[in-house]
Image (cartoon, rainbow, N blue to C red):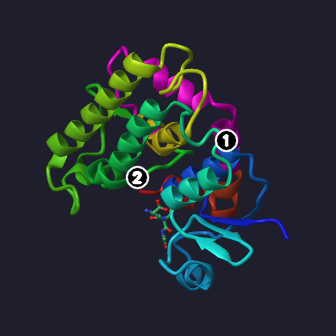
Amino acid sequence: MSPILYIGDAWSASWSICGWLACRLAGLEVEERSIFLGQPQTRKEILEVSPSGRVPVLVNGSTVVWDSMAIAEYLWELNPNGQIWPQDFEQRCYARCIAAEVHREFEEVRVAMPMNLIKRWPMRNGLPSIETRMKGPGVKGGREGVMEGLRRMEEIWRDCRQKYGAGGPYLFGANYTFVDALFAPMVSRYVTYGVEAAEDVAPYIGANMAYPPMQEWISRAERDAEVVGRDVAMAFP
Ligand SMILES: N[C@@H](CCC(=O)N[C@@H](CS)C(=O)NCC(=O)O)C(=O)O
């Protein structure tokens, strides 16, 4: 039986992309099963497969892996020659530092600007016009906190690309790795909310968005939004 990857709706499930891209990077063929989020039965359905009540979850025989980062590490253990982490030891150490940071931090960006792959917010004065969310609960630092998060993210992209990115458009050059996958939901927010990135990192955002599996996920987002109702998706957040 092939491994099963449970994911949420592609248009909004920001961690699900990461788990899905990890499987792609590792070359693992999985059966993909979508659990639509925000439905009356969602929690029950997820809890049937995931002890944390969250997706993505990879089920491979008797092994259950219920977190995007843990999925990436599991896949790396199965195949250390895959594309999950850079092959170079020093680069891999750096990659893990960034991965840990993006996996744990940037709460304000996540809360103020939820991922929505099918929507475009209007711009106002060069900044995303989502003032009400910037002041909402969970966004402790308000607009400043959100902007600080975005600037820190851009600093990570700049630094990593300067150190290791010379050979191609991704953080570690020619090979897209799991760190790029962790940033996929983040770069998509720049597009959704029309955030202006610093000029030197803007090409990275374009490259991550254009990565063919990311484009495949975006097509899936369009399909999932049709299922849940485009009006519902457009009303979020
Ligand atoms: N840290 C976890 C976070 C997973 C997470 O928050 N997943 C969201 C969707 S992408 C979820 O399952 N939400 C449950 C719900 O909306 O009911 C990971 O990296 O996998």
Q: Tell me, for residue 100, which label it has, or none.
A: none
**Magenta region, main secondary structure:** helix
Binning the other alpha carbons within 10 Å of mark 2 as few (below 14), some (14 to 19) or many (20 upward) gives many
Q: Looking at the rendering, which quadrant does residue 212 occupy?
A: top right
Residue 97, position in %: x, y? 35, 43
Up/down of 204 relative to 129, above or below: above
For the record, the magenta segment spans: 192-221
Question: Among all residues in the image, which is located at the extreme front?
Answer: 89
Say which element carries label 2: loop
50 or 39, which lies in front?
Answer: 50
Up/down of 137 relative to 169, above or below: below
What residue is shown with label 2?
114
| Callout 1–callout 2 Cβ contact below 8 Å | no
Residue 191, position in %: x, y? 46, 33
Binning the other alpha carbons within 10 Å of mark 1 as few (below 14), some (14 to 19) or many (20 upward) gives some
Say which element carries label 1: loop
* Residue type indicated by callout 1: Gly
Q: Tell me, for residue 82, which label it has, or none.
A: 1
Judged by depth in the image, the label closer to the viewer, 1 or 2, is 1
Residue 114, position in %: x, y? 40, 52
Left or right, residue 6 beside residue 108: right
Left or right, residue 5 beside residue 125: right
